[in-house]
Amino acid sequence: MSTPAASGAPTSAMLIIFSLAMGGFAIGTGEFAIMGLMPNVARDLGITEPQVGHLISAYALGVVVGAPLLAVFGARLLRKHLLIALMGFYAVGNLASALAPSYDTLLAYRFIAGLPHGAYFGVAALVAASLVPAGQRATAVSLVMMGLALALLFGNPLATLLGQHIDWRYAFWFVGGVATLTTALIGFTLPLNRDEPRHSAFHELRAFNRREIWYPLAIGSIGFAGMFCVFSYLAPTLLHVTGADPLWIPVALFVFGLGGFAGNILGGWLFDRMNFQSVGWILLWAAAMLMLFPLAAGTLGPLLLICFLVALMVALGPALQTHLMDVARDAQTLAAASHHGAFNLANALGPWLGGMAINAGLGWQVTGYVGAATALAGLLVFFVAWKQQPDNEAAAGSQLTL
């Protein structure tokens, strides 16, 4: 199936992209909801806020484990069937989280809920890219990822309000409901293409083992950790450093989501014009903004502004996702899914490093400096990857002048 462009696609193609993006909305809300409810979950379960950070890491590790495993073993399935199974699994994991009776069971359920995350986004990106010409692929991928951006913009603040005014468990009831609706929509809108390429698990694994794939995965898992480091502890930073009323937490999450929404569009636009070099510019921007975060944390206005600017680094998502599709060859499903596994390794790494720095007595705002260090480390990996590109790939965009 092909269309002239993402923006001018037929109604059927846009309905498919909408359905896939709704799945992204469910996943994004489920992934980030607990970050805005950190004080509420800690109080209800009788644990510390850094322990709530472990719930975030458990989900992220579920993504890291589940992305390659489910992608490899699902490689022989038709993409429609695989997407339905993955989103149904996600619905069950979040409904179970809403019913968790204790911290230990919630920890296990968050890990389980994370398992289908990466494989879903990976397969959804491949489906979206197949709907448009080659020069529009990053834009199509960013449209699917728009669901994730809208989760940051609307889903996460809404889940936070539900948790603050009713109970934090309602956030996961909401996510489970949206995931169930998405499962039905994909079944209704996505045609069954029995001619699509399918590979054995061994074939995908053999094609996957190349440095052109491992470099962008390393960039995502290290360079993106800074955003999660700041975002995970944003609520306690607002309360303990800025001195803001708890009602400002959903507002800050909305502003962060607005930056993520803009960054998602920016990432697709940049990659369609600059190719792989766009990744270097995004990481350089991220490092600079993260360095400014601790300086802005003491005052509400500057903090909200820096939240928006830090969240623009979401642009890294569609840029790296499309680059992986360019270099993956016969490991498309595994590489696309592993991209989200890498980002959720960053989601585990960021809160863990930030929690260690906070527990060492360096203050909640230290997350900005920790995040800047990871962005710079990702930039270093990018430079190594850039220098080792084949000449024809390096020439695909204009010369890098960082």
Image (cartoon, helix red, strand yellow):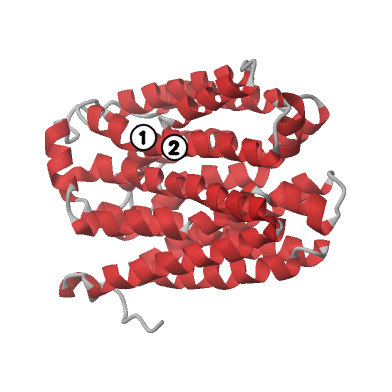
Please tell me which residue is depicted at 81% across the width and 52% down the height of the picture: 240
* Label 1: element kind: helix
Residue nearest the observer in this picture, 209 or 51: 51
Q: Position of residue 392 (x, y in %)?
A: 17, 72
Please tell me which residue is depicted at 30% across the width and 37% down the height of the picture: 68
Q: Tell me the tag on residue 65.
A: 1
Residue nearest the observer in this picture, 362 or 332: 362
Q: Amino acid at mark 2?
A: Leu
Q: Callout 1: few (<14), some (14-19), or many (20+) C-alpha neighbours within 10 Å?
A: many
Picture layout, residue 26 above or below residue 353: above
Q: Position of residue 388 (x, y in %)?
A: 21, 71
Badge 2 vs badge 1, beta-carbon distance below 8 Å: yes
Would you name the residue on which mark 2 appears? Answer: 61
Q: Amino acid at mark 1?
A: Val
Residue 160 falls in which quadrant of the image?
A: top right
Q: Position of residue 14 (x, y in %)?
A: 44, 41
Q: CA distance from mark 2 to mark 1?
A: 6 Å
Figure quadrant of the C terminus: bottom left
Residue nearest the observer in this picture, 202 or 144: 202
Q: Residue furthest bottom?
A: 401
Q: Position of residue 242 (x, y in %)?
A: 82, 58
Q: Residue furthest front?
A: 360
Please tell me which residue is depicted at 41% across the width and 30% down the height of the picture: 115
Please tell me which residue is depicted at 64% across the width and 19% down the height of the picture: 102
Q: Callout 2: few (<14), some (14-19), or many (20+) C-alpha neighbours within 10 Å?
A: many
Name the side, left or right, on which 394 lies relative to 381. Answer: left
Q: Can you see residue 134?
A: no
Figure quadrant of the N terminus: top left
